[in-house]
Amino acid sequence: MGNITSCCESCFQGRRSQSYEPLLLENEREAVADLLQYLENRTTTNFFTGSPLSALTTLSFSDNVDLQRSAALAFAEITEKEVRPVGRDTLDPILFLLSSHDTEVQRAASAALGNLAVNTDNKLLIVKLGGLEPLIRQMLSPNVEVQCNAVGCVTNLATHDDNKTKIAKSGALVPLTRLARSKDMRVQRNATGALLNMTHSDENRQQLVNAGAIPVLVGLLNSPDTDVQYYCTTALSNIAVDATNRKKLAQSEPKLVSSLVQLMDSSSLKVQCQAALALRNLASDEKYQLDIVKADGLASLLRLLQSTYLPLILSSAACVRNVSIHPQNESPIIESGFLQPLINLLSFKDNEEVQCHAISTLRNLAASSEKNKLAIVQAGAVQSIKELVLEVPMNVQSEMTACIAVLALSDELKGQLLDMGICEVLIPLTNSPSSEVQGNSAAALGNLSSKDGRSSSDDYSAFNDVWDRPDGGMHRYLYRFLSSPDTTFQHIAVWTIVQLLESGDPQLISNIRSSTLLLPHIRNLSNSRTASPTSSGGTPRSHRSQSQSYQDTDTGDGQGEIQLLSRRILELVDGEDALVSASVPGSHVQPGSSLGSSAAGRDHEELRRSVREAFAPGSHR
């Protein structure tokens, strides 16, 4: 805790020379003599028990201020060199000294208490014994040394979760907030450190906000002291976890984003890291997603993203992911040069979270623009995904397959993706242990199989190439999904089969028409009413509008989507027109063709739109 004058034998020997022994009580004289002896052998003496502690206790409870000072200084020096769990018999005399009206006694006693508060058990016992009240009084002291030690002690106490709420309710937050503005840098450090320690729970964060801590913390972001910057940045990052607090910050702190952007260029790595994390939390809201770009934050984030220091890479990757959620930020991020660094991070095997942030950002960047989708593919993202996706952790697989599903929405890119052989890695993943990976992979295959405006030049040979391989190919994948109890998966399968049949590719139509695995399930689904999905594994995250697209969506004739899609398949497989079309090179069945009534055709057009929306992974997250 520091700044305590050393207490040695001279403390007492000086007093002996002043010949004040007659003013002392007998037990006090004995305590002085005993303590002098123990101090001569301090390296082998345990001052926290027995006669040494008894001597210190006698001097602590003395009415003689000089003896109190000697006891307080002795406690401070002893605890500076040795900290161990102590009992009430040690803490009671120190807490008594803490309530002294003498500044020197207060200063030394709070230093001793702060030293002991480094120990976990002691933290709890100090609060339990009522240590907060005298510490709060000392925080209000006009003496800077007393303030510094008292606040430092509270900082240590606040590192224990069980103490945080008690401190928040004790009235300590207001003086802590005031002392954070102290002109003394030591007091400032201790006070901002204590405020930081109080930001780890919702309730305490709200108490801090109510105590007026936000403007103080924001103002101190510009402190010349890197420790103060770090404490304030981290505290604000924690405060920004709460949506209500982000709203307050947006209303009252217009310079917050620019200050944090500047701190990403700090000379301190830990300040840079926390500034990026604070911006990441703020970027949970649309306003801040835009503000970070307007404040030129992308340049600093790109620099951190390319660092060799993992915490910087992780914090900046997380921040960019949130910033990329806003559609207006997609092009600025790409134009700032993020694509290649993000693609490079896909193979960052040292940290799964970095990989997830990188691929999720790429997916967000692809969500709203054909131009951006093309740029991502041209930058090599799909090739990297293809090379990595079968080996990366399951969470990364889920994000990668969701990204492919988004890219596969582009009619212009479907051919390129198929030529890259992406189906060869998607098909095995439809049998993943993760329902999310299964669903995302199937959604990607479904998106690749569909096209708004088909022409005779469309090439579906890639699906024939993987019909039976790898891992049973499209054939086995569609069979598994058709026979799944999860109606989401059934829905994906029948939709995909419709797209493959409507391609007009004779080989695909023949493969499906001759399948003894697929057609029995399709006939069963065409005759049974579709229930709402109840997947035990959960609906894959890649599907948007889940609450509508995968429920029993009734059309005019009262049948659900899966039933309608299954009947559409049977029309395409069994109908004479379908066979004629399949026999003519380059011809294909258009949606809503002569197969079935015109009303059924209109229903099918609506169905196509509904399911295409369902196949689009959630655009931004």
Image (cartoon, rainbow, N blue to C red):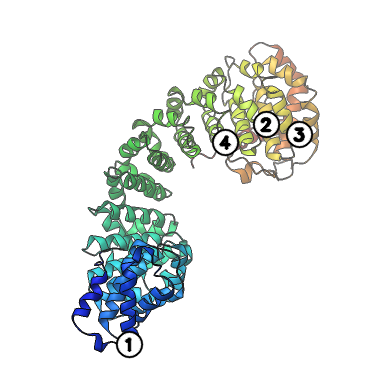
Seen in the picture, residue 61 relative to 610 is either above or below; the reply is below
Work out whether residue 215 can be spotted. no
Q: Which class describes the residues within 10 Å of circle 2: few (<14), some (14-19), or many (20+)?
A: some
Seen in the picture, residue 590 relative to 317 is either above or below; the reply is above
Which of the 4 image quarters holds residue 69?
bottom left
Q: Position of residue 49 (x, y in %)?
A: 43, 72
* Residue at 26% over, 71% down: 9
Tell us which disc is closer to us: 4 or 3: 4
Spatial separation of the CA atoms under disc 4 and disc 1: 79 Å
Seen in the picture, residue 123 relative to 247 is either above or below; the reply is below
Residue marked by disc 1:
26
Q: Earlier along the polypeptide chain: callout 4 or callout 3?
A: 4
Work out whether residue 378 can be spotted. yes
Residue marked by disc 3:
483
Q: Position of residue 16 (x, y in %)?
A: 22, 79
Horizontally, residue 389 falls left or right of residue 81, namely: right
Which of the 4 image quarters holds residue 438?
top right
Find residue 398 and name its label.
4
27 and 567: which is toward the camera? 27
Instruction: Tell me whether circle 4 and circle 3 mark residues in contact (CB < 8 Å).
Output: no
Find residue 431 and name its label.
2
Instruction: Tell me whether circle 2 and circle 4 mark residues in contact (CB < 8 Å).
Output: no
Q: Position of residue 485 (x, y in %)?
A: 74, 39
Q: Amino acid at mark 3?
A: Ser
151 and 509: which is toward the camera? 151
